[in-house]
Image (spheres, grey):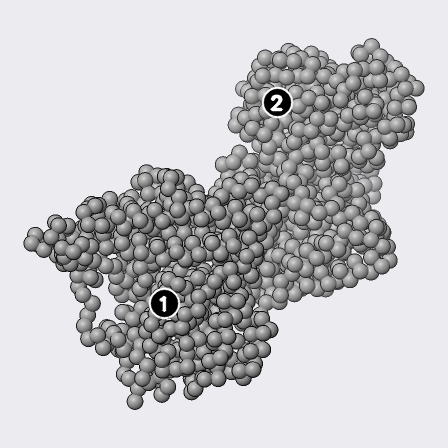
Amino acid sequence: MSKIICSAAIRGAHKIVDMAEEKYEEALKKFGPEQEVSFPNTAYFLPVIYSMLGAKVQNIGDMKDIFQECRKLLPPIVSDTIWLPYLAPALDAGMATFFAEEMYESIRYLNEPEFYTKTEDPGSENIWLGAADDLIFRKRGVEFVDGTAPGFAAIMGAPPNKEIASKIALELQEKNLYIFMHDHTDGVRIAEQLIDNEVQIGWNTRLVPFGPTYTSAVFAIGFACRVAMAFGGIKPGDYKGNLIYNKDRTFAFVMAFGPVSDEWYANAAGAINWGFPTISDYDIPEVLPTGICTYEHVVSQVPHEEIVQKAIEVRGLKVTVSKIDIPLSYGPAFEGERIRKDDLFMECGGGRTTGVEVLISKDMEEVQDGLVTVEGPDIKDIKEGENLPLAILVEVAGREMQSDFEPILERQFHHLINYVQGIMHIGQRNIMWVRIGKAAVEKGFSFEHVGKVLHGKLHQEFGAILDKIQVKIYTIQEKVEEVVELAKKVYTERDERLGTMTDDTEDIFYSCTLCQSFAPSHVCVITPERVGMCGAYNWLDGKASFQINPTGPNQPIEKGECIDPDIGFFTGINEFVNQASRGAVTDVSCYSLMTDPMTACGCFEAIAAMLPQCNGIMVVNRDYMGMTPSGMKFTTLAGMAGGGAQTPGFMGVSKHYLTSRKLFKAEGGLKRVVWLPKMLKEELKDKLIERCNEEGMPELFDMIATEEQGITEEEILKFLKEKGHPALSMETAV
Amino acid sequence: MSIKRNGCEGCSEITCTSTKEVLSKDIAKNVITAYDRVQARGMSACLFGSGGTCCRNCNMGPCQIIEGVDDLIGICGATADTVAARNFARTIASGTSAHTDHAREMVKGFIETAKGETPHEIKDEVKLHMLAEVFGVETEGKDKNEIALEIGKMALNDFGKQDDEPVTMVKRAPAKRQEIWKKYNIAPRGVDREVVEMMHRTHMGVDQDYRNLMLQGARCALADGWGSSMLSTELTDIMFGTPVPRRAIVDLGVLKEDQVNVTVHGHEPLLAEALCLAAQEPDMLELAKKAGAKGINLAGVCCTGNEILMRRGIPVAAGFIQQEMAIATGAVEAMVVDVQCIMQSVAEVAKSFHTDVITTNYRAKMPGAVHIQFEEEEALQSAKEILTHAIKNYKKRGDCFIPTENKLDVVVGFSHETINYMLGGRFRSSYRPLNDNIINGRIRGVAAIVGCDNYKLPDDRHEIIARELIKNDVLVLATGCAATALGRVGLLRPEAAREAGPGLAEICETVGMPPVLHCGSCVDNSRLLIAATEMVREGGLGEDISELPLAGTAPLWMSEKAVAIGQYFVSSGAYVCFQNLPTSGSKVFTKHLFEEMEEMYGGRWDVAEDPLELAKQMIAHIDKKRAALGIDKKRERVLFDMEMRRDLGTGSGIGDVGCHGQQHLS
């Protein structure tokens, strides 16, 4: 009975708008209209209001107009007889609900600054994180873009006990979904149930405790709105574009436990605007006809053991879960899980013991597919706290295998091993580090499982190039050292081969449209000397990916004739991008910030921006939250560089590109770089110094300013003058 | 003893309760109504006239033609098919002319409003801008009246233009449909020109090929639907407000014992809107009070009623067949009329009461009526004059009988914009849910029940057809007097969803709408063209109106306008079934209407005398279209993986499930 739901939603919306408006009146009296309001560290203001109405709520005074809009949207209560159509009014009421909740929550940040932790992980006293800031949002957004997270479940309330709660959370994790948690059922909160059952929660395990009240549901919706703006290039105020984008691309739904209040109905009705249906375990009416959501709108009385399956079916989501035969849960949702000291059973590598991992290709007859051996003591043979050396040697063979693909396959180890619940993997090569948690050991974890995972997953993902895979695991010191020696030899050969590959030696570049599921008009061009701006895909990845899936997101681009070697104009690239962006972008330079810079989806590691006064370029990485000399923080800059648009002077780049010989070649290369955040400069220190030497200016490294020298152009200019930075004497770049 | 009255020529019973009650009362016992005249005439309709083969287009005849009898062709040699086609085409021309003259008045009123010379204003600016785009009017930096004036002038030009380009609104039709019109060269040029050319070509000795005649018949009808009617609907909406859902009441019970009852009968809402404004003026209310009345009760009759019902929620007292009954209550101070469908008999009936029939349009006068010319430039003044006249009559009211029990609640106001909104709200408005649920079979299809009512057939036809359709999960859109008739039997109430089949009932319940949607007056059938076009545009149901599971009927048609409407639907690709057509005298011509037209336009004419049979034929057509679309079978749920989501961006989309990638931007 849609009528019951719509009537309740409209009632709920009235209550919520009334409540929020009361808070607003109070805040207006207390702080005055000029008082700034915002969610923490975001360039999207109050994101639902910004994306739907295009209105920037920056101070309390700005809320007046939005409340007027809410009042316009709020329909009268549905009458018992001779009712007027109520579905559309209920959806409008749901929208007013979100506007009101956003303002309510922003006032809460003002009144109770400590109400939310504003962190990625819950604290020991307070577990409620509050709205995702842009740092978290961009980091996690990448997963939405590349498909490792197809969407999210917005959970209202809690299931009857912690066992069911944990099981549902785990199932959702196994479907790779994010789980946003809000409010309570009879005082019980799912986030607390999970903690009580020793389940790790926080952004890293995708189990996100947003807030203890229903109004925090607006954080989940705000997240979706930002995905559309940041990655989809949807403009603020293009409400229909944003809503349809989310309906088609963000596979989110509401999962409600227990009795449903008018306020919950109001939130659920609002979510339907985005195509997010509601799945409930309670005896509430259903709305089965389709149209606003892709399939059903409200499905109820779903038993707990079926609720996750039902939810993804109702939302129309296909998740291909690869079953790996190990006694532990497995999937991307467990990648970010941490093994803390108290949970630790044992560890390998990471400076504690010798550790190494390497993949090499062999002839077909040398490899026995599926063979997994463990030489030396296994987990069952040791006691807690007893660490072991570890070598993982993977030998592969395949008709399409090339030695160039070895590093790509090896690089998968990190996430493939990390996907195992209860195991943490850090680093790579001979600086790898594995921590094994007590919980994993209790479930029967063995090193053999690492072998099974690598065998199974590499086959699955690289089946087109691999025919046989065998995994040898050693936990005896001398054997491990043998592998280390072998590995070092392999690494050296590899690095030499890679180092000689340049844009000039290769005729084929690769496109990357992996992000087009979320950023429809963006095309990345990956060259040997320019890694994809997300930092995750280099030229070899593109090559391998094309080999594996010839119709996939990475396509070869014949670079064609080079029209301008400094700017990096190639006829083949322009033709390709013009066609792949459907005419949106006609010219793309490979090495310039100022002339037809490359577009970005929004999941770049860093942003380069021109500083006109300094006549130089600054680069800021995603993790740097402070102000930059451009007068903008990363989040604001991201808005100028993302969404598939070309904005001369602003460009998304990978960190790795900073050490490329082709960096900003058109503008004078590394010598044009005048400012980096300290953390980024430190991270790239060795390679940057190497590049400075190559440029014949070893002193250049120290001439590049950081926030320590200043965060305004004036301060930086002064510093550059003192140091005699080469950018100052270059021709003007603007 | 009151007169014993039959329901119609072939049936003994009037089923409409309010009509029966009024006619059974003493005060009405000597009133002669159309029912009585059906009986009194004592003869059946002429067979040649009914069959469409009586030709009186020149003075050599009249000639009655019998198809297949060599000696009984026309004196000029005209065959039955030619004569039937000529008569049919002239009917279309007459119907078109009625809508056109109505529309012309509306456009002129619109222009005067834009100039600030009427009491009205440009109300719907969203629609104004939408139309500005259709007409290619630049809106930047102009105020609403400037834009309206430009649109108005261009609209007026569509009536009288002489070049061969199609009228403006034609470009709103689906591309495939426009191609078909181009192929047969029937895209309408100037509206007046098509009527004139039709009259010329049916003149003695001009076009004597029924197929060729009907090409112009189609073009003339399209000039009505996509020309004048659509202009009228759209500009009237902009001026008086696009209808939104509202509650109202219908039937004779809406008349009020203690108020001055003024019924407004006819078609053009300019007069009615002015009366609505005037009836709220303090001086008028004061005058009514002085006369001893508690207020002024405006009530609609026929399509004027539908216009102010849709836009203002003013009650409708009667449809076409009840116009005499309204006066026979003895409670009506004045029946204010303008043009079309006003029976001459109302002046006669009024003689038995204190009622004045007030004609207001120089085009339409009748003996026994009072004429007060309605001047658009002094609209309020004219309206007050008319009301003053009515108020004066209040004191003269004698015995009266209002069937107060006979009034029913209705929910009305289902314009194209309302439908679009009600399916998704302000932020997600679209026809997607309609298409989706047609595709998944909850809604089997869409039917239009439009047009008049008459005294030739029993008065419950609309109801029987509508009930059968909704029972079979067919959503019904209604206009004109058909809509009033369905309102009288409670089918315009949301509660009527109970009587629908399970699929349609579920949709009605989800949206909160009745199973029969009142879309406006007869000129507003153009809304249905737009709705059908929007269904095509939304995707998943083919590329043209002819592919939609859609059928139309005007079962109790009376006015020639109904034939024009029927033909513009057929030429737009729809299946249209009437209870009879004046073409039965020529099988050859009937075959053209029933079969050849389907090959040409994808839509066709049909007839079915029995109402249940008629509904079944409509459903059969809907099922045929469902099968052609391949939506007659159960379909698998499509689940999306990342790759499919990426494909959305390439523009291919997955239309079946409503995913169109970036299409919303266009």
Disc 2 and disc 1: Cα gap in Å? 72 Å
Residue B231, percent from left and from top: 45, 51
Residue depicted at 53% across the width and 42% down the height: B137
For residue B62, which quarter of the picture?
Answer: bottom left
Residue farthest to the right?
Answer: A722
Q: Name the residue beneath numbered marker 2.
A: A587
SS for tag 2?
loop
Q: How many marks?
A: 2
Taking depth in this image into account, of A409 and B626 the one nearest to the observer is B626
Q: Residues within 10 Å of mark 2 (few under 14, many from 20)?
A: many
Residue A93, percent from left and from top: 64, 59
Q: Is residue A115 left or right of residue B109?
A: right
Taking depth in this image into account, of A697 and B291 the one nearest to the observer is B291
Location of residue B601 with respect to B257 vertically, above or below: above
Taking depth in this image into account, of B184 and B217 the one nearest to the observer is B217
Whether residue A390 is visible here, answered yes or no, is no
Residue depicted at 80% across the width and 34% down the height: A632
Q: Is residue B90 left or right of residue B226?
A: left
Location of the C terminus of chain A (image quadrant):
top right
Location of residue B435 with respect to B370 vertically, above or below: above
Q: Is residue A597 left or right of residue A129?
A: left
Residue B203, percent from left and from top: 22, 50
Location of residue B404 with respect to A669 vertically, above or below: below
Q: Are marks 2 and 1 in contact (CB under 8 Å)?
A: no
Q: Mark number for residue B365?
A: 1
The residue under label 1 is which amino acid type? Answer: Lys
SS for tag 1?
loop
Whether residue A31 is visible here, answered yes or no, is yes
Q: Residues within 10 Å of mark 1 (few under 14, many from 20)?
A: some
